Amino acid sequence: MIRRAAAILWLLPVTVCAHGWGGTNTPVYNGILHVLLNPSFILPIAGVALLASLGGREQLVLAQAGLAGGVAAGAAAVLAGLSWSGVVVANRLLIVAAGLLVALNTVLPRPVVLAVAMMGGALTGHELLVSEPPGDSPLWFSLGAVLGAMVLQGGVGALTLLAHAPWTRVAVRIAGSWIAAVGIIYAGFLLLPAR
Amino acid sequence: MMHPSRHLLVVTLLLVPALAVAHVQGGTAGGAGFLTGLLHPLTGLDHVAAMVAVGLWGAQLGAPALWALPVAFPLIMALGGAAGAAGLPLPGVETGIAASGLLLGLAVLLSIRVPLWVALLPVSVFAVYHGHAHGTEMPTTGQPLQYAAGFVLATGTLHLCGIAIGLLWRWPHGQWVVRASGGVIAGVGGFLLLT
């Protein structure tokens, strides 16, 4: 009995962080969750995913590649010391543009989808690294951000590809209008004179 | 020989952690801003009545108003929200919001059938008023984007509730339910206009 108790006592944790995502977790995990838990990153990625998926599976795959490359490039730019102060405004304007195009049920040509996905990825990676300093493991943090962005885009895109019924197509357009609406409000908040 | 239940008690006590941080959401999760925005349309009877009325009227009018109104409303509301967030004044906001409940409720009660562009006119004007009210109460510090996402989501959900009730229009008895809902909303709007 005493041996068993001693063994269990040895396993007793001092602090349990079962669902936390603070400093005790790996930088990859932090990178993933920073993308998946922040509307600043969720909205542009989801908007681009909806937009790409309106053009079919091939466009979504293209957008996945563009997004991954863009996030990596945007993060690399910050790590290389290149920082652009207009990244937040540009990211909000991308939310508005992507949401509006989805609300209007627009199918863009492939090169444009690739360019939009790359731009969205670059803005996301850049803003993420500027707003959330990753500490001493920026490469792993950036890798996590790329993974998080791809999972989010892939999930939203897959759901959109499955939307064949008329009401689900309407739901996609409504989702686009919601994304654009949030972007318009926040862009106005950033661009118009402050209270 | 220790009783098995005592074994269990000892083991359970040994496994109790000194500190548990399960599901801690610090940093960028943004619960407060999102929840504040989400609750703003839901906790005001004026907003609830008007948003549900938009959905009801859209369902009564049928396609394309059924989807065009919920798609257009958030986008136009966002313009008012951006103006409100930026501190641009809009006279008669409270009156406009109360009038929206009254007039949209009457449109449902009387089952007024108009072309889509005619339906969009009053709905757009009312959307600006509602958006301005939300935007005015937008936090200037903290998490404005989360707040915006919350109130757009809540507004859209109220529209969907209205549409869901409005789908009863297909059945004769359901038409009375829809009209009665419009009557209640008009009553609420009229009451708010007078008080």
Image (cartoon, coloured by chain):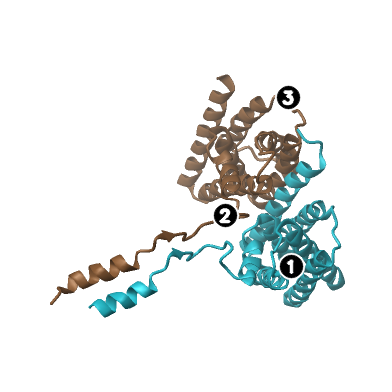
Q: Quadrant of the N terminus of chain A?
A: bottom left
Q: Quadrant of the C terminus of chain A?
A: top right
Which numbered disc covers residue A54? 1
Which numbered disc covers residue B7? none
Q: Which chain is brown?
A: B
Left or right: B102 in relation to B118: left
Residue A162 in sight here: no
Q: Which chain is cyan?
A: A
What is the secondary structure assignment of the residue under circle 2?
A: loop
User: Are the residues under marks 2 and 1 on the same chain?
Assistant: no
What is the secondary structure assignment of the residue under circle 1?
A: loop
State how far apart marks 2 and 3 are (Cα).
Answer: 39 Å
- Image quarter of residue B138: top right
Of badges 1 and 3, the one in the foreground is: 3
Return the x and y of residue A42 as percentages of the image width and height: 67, 60
State how far apart marks 2 and 1 are (Cα).
Answer: 35 Å
Which numbered disc covers residue B26? 2
Residue contact at pointers 2 and 1, CB within 8 angstroms: no
- Image quarter of residue A191: top right
Q: Amino acid at mark 3?
A: Pro
Disc 3 sits on a residue from what chain? Answer: B
